[in-house]
Image (tube, grey):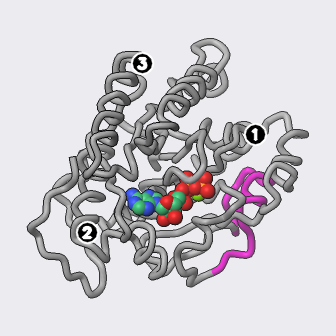
Amino acid sequence: MPRFPRVYSIVATKGGVGKTTTVVNVAGMIADIGQRALIVDGDPQKSATDYFEITELAPHGLIQVFKSASTDGCISKTAIPNLDIILNDDIKGDSGEIPTFLRKSMTHCMRLRFALEALKDQYDYIIMDSQGDQNVVQESIILASDSLIIPINPEVLATRVVMQETAELVKNKFHPKLGFPAFTGRSAPSVKILINKYISQTNSSKELTALLRQYFNSEFDDLVQVLDTIIPNKEFYRNQAVAMRTPVHRLNREAYFTMLSLVTEDLEPKLSGLEPQWEGKRIEKSATAAR
Ligand SMILES: Nc1ncnc2c1ncn2[C@@H]1O[C@H](COP(=O)(O)OP(=O)(O)OP(=O)(O)O)[C@@H](O)[C@H]1O
Ligand SMILES: [Mg+2]
């Protein structure tokens, strides 16, 4: 039996690749499918914190989660039914309250994990955003995760560097003796590479995607999987959805099928067949997901 809630974290070594976009849209889709979802904003830039309208503001946010190793008084409600959020209130990054506190705490790495495990009866899924830097907060996030999603943009100059950095991240954190299993007593989270901002008109997106698939599938056996669903580079992910503070699948038919495929076919096949529902839903069912 899987442990509930299932915890996904979106991490990357590079900025601007689509971590927050993935967090808000995956969490929004999961919530509309009828699952109880919680976003944890682990990035001091607080883009996920600012994305959805907050309808009930909790007295505390992420700082208190780390300090008390509990989420009591830290969960705010969003305007999306089934979707709650722990807001990031520690905006100073590496010199902020959380990293300063964690550096002095012997149990630093396990505090977030401990706090989230106590939510097993309240949520089905927890989706965490993170910042690009490898610091104590990112380590806490990884240690609390069942799966990591790493968005990668198939761009000519960046791809090889990102491949290398991602490989190092996985190898360093998941060393069989010193890494993840030693801390947690369980196996390392699965790593899922998500191709994002794919430009279908260019050959380079296609070639780089093939290269990424070949590299990760051959280097890492089953630990790293390149997801089948590809997220295209489209304005509606960048503009309309952000401006309207809504999950992108509610606004655009193509995005509806892409996000549905990502969530129900790639990430959580057990949710296949469930239809997203929301107030005022209007989606024509004739598009196919980008694959
Ligand atoms: N598939 C996509 N198509 C078009 N634009 C996208 C797509 N995915 C993300 N974007 C845009 O790219 C920019 C960066 O995305 P996002 O903020 O999600 O990245 P990030 O990895 O969270 O960045 P940061 O490192 O700053 O936290 C945003 O303007 C976002 O709207
Ligand atoms: Mg972000």
Residue 70 in the magenta stretch? The answer is yes
Q: CA distance from mark 2 to mark 1?
A: 36 Å
Residue range highlighted in magenta: 57-73
Dot 1 crowding, Cα within 10 Å, few <14, some 14–19, many 20+: some
Q: Which mark is residue 220?
A: 3
Decide: is 75 above or below 142: below
**Which of the marked residues, 2 or 1, is nearer the chain's N terminus?**
1
* Front-most of residues 19 and 156: 156
Q: SS of the residue at dot 2? A: loop
Q: Quadrant of residue 90?
A: bottom right
Residue matched to label 1: 136
Amino acid type, residue under disc 3 in the picture = Phe
Q: Quadrant of residue 74?
A: bottom right
Please tell me which residue is depicted at 60% across the width and 39% down the height of the picture: 13
Q: SS of the residue at dot 1? A: helix
Task: Say whether residue 128 is visible.
Answer: no
Looking at the picture, how far across and down is residue 281, in whole percent? 24, 82
Q: SS of the residue at dot 3? A: loop
Residue matched to label 2: 276
Q: CA distance from mark 2 to mark 3?
A: 34 Å
